[in-house]
Image: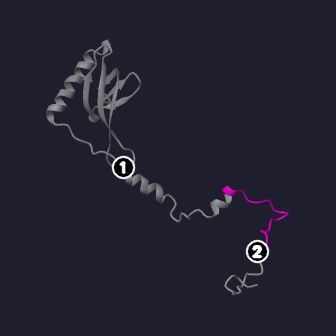
């Protein structure tokens, strides 16, 4: 068989035949067929490691002596007035569990306990904030 240009090719005799459909084997679903052509991941977990490296974390800023003194006075005031259930807005550093750095979090809540033994502030919603992670404490008006 000759094509438009008068040339013959190796598969000219079968090129226009209808597509074969098996009578005994069911056709593979389109989703499974597409999976055959998915890229091969030779390094399992490599993509996740790259994403983790790209994830942004903030550096922890150490408060100066004056800021530490203010925090200590406010913690002492809260401890002395714990029966009044003081409501505060606390900004603290949350260390990242997987890499260096973390992020600064701000929560508002009622102080349940100042744990001087474990050096933690416990809010009514069970949020625990280690003293060393505190950045700022602001008292809320009731």
State the residue lying farthest toward the left. Answer: 66
Residue 5's image quarter? bottom right
Q: Quadrant of the N terminus?
A: bottom right
Secondary structure, magenta segment, majority class? loop
Q: In this rendering, would 5 be left or right of 58?
A: right
Q: Which residue: 61% across, 64% down? A: 37
Q: In this rendering, would 113 be left or right of 23?
A: left
Q: Residue 111 or 5: which is nearer the viewer?
A: 5
Disc ID at residue 16: 2
Residue 136's image quarter? top left
Disc ID at residue 53: none
Q: Position of residue 6 (x, y in %)?
A: 69, 87
Q: In whole angstroms, how far apart are the C-alphas of marks 1 and 2?
A: 60 Å
Q: In this rendering, would 24 be left or right of 11?
A: right
Disc ID at residue 99: 1
Q: Secondary structure at mark 2?
A: loop
| The magenta segment | 16-31
Residue 20's image quarter? bottom right
Q: Position of residue 60 (x, y in %)?
A: 26, 43
Q: Which residue: 73% across, 59% down? A: 28
Query: In the rendered structure, does residue 45 fall within the stretch colored magenta?
Result: no
Q: Which residue: 52% across, 60% down? A: 44
Q: Which residue: 64% across, 63% down? A: 36
């Amino acid at each position: 068989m000759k094509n438009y240009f008068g040339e013959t090719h190796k598969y000219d005799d079968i090129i226009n035949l209808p597509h074969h459909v098996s009578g005994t084997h069911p056709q593979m679903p389109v989703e499974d067929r597409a999976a055959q052509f998915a890229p091969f991941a030779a390094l399992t977990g490599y993509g996740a490691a790259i994403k983790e490296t790209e994830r942004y974390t903030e550096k922890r800023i150490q408060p100066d002596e004056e800021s530490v003194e203010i925090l200590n006075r406010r913690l002492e005031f809260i401890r002395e007035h714990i029966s009044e259930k003081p409501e505060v807005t606390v900004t603290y550093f949350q260390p990242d569990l997987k890499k260096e750095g973390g992020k600064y979090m701000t929560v508002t809540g009622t102080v349940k306990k100042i744990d001087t033994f474990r050096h933690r502030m416990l809010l009514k919603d069970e949020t625990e904030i280690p003293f060393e992670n505190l950045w700022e404490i602001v008292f809320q008006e009731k």
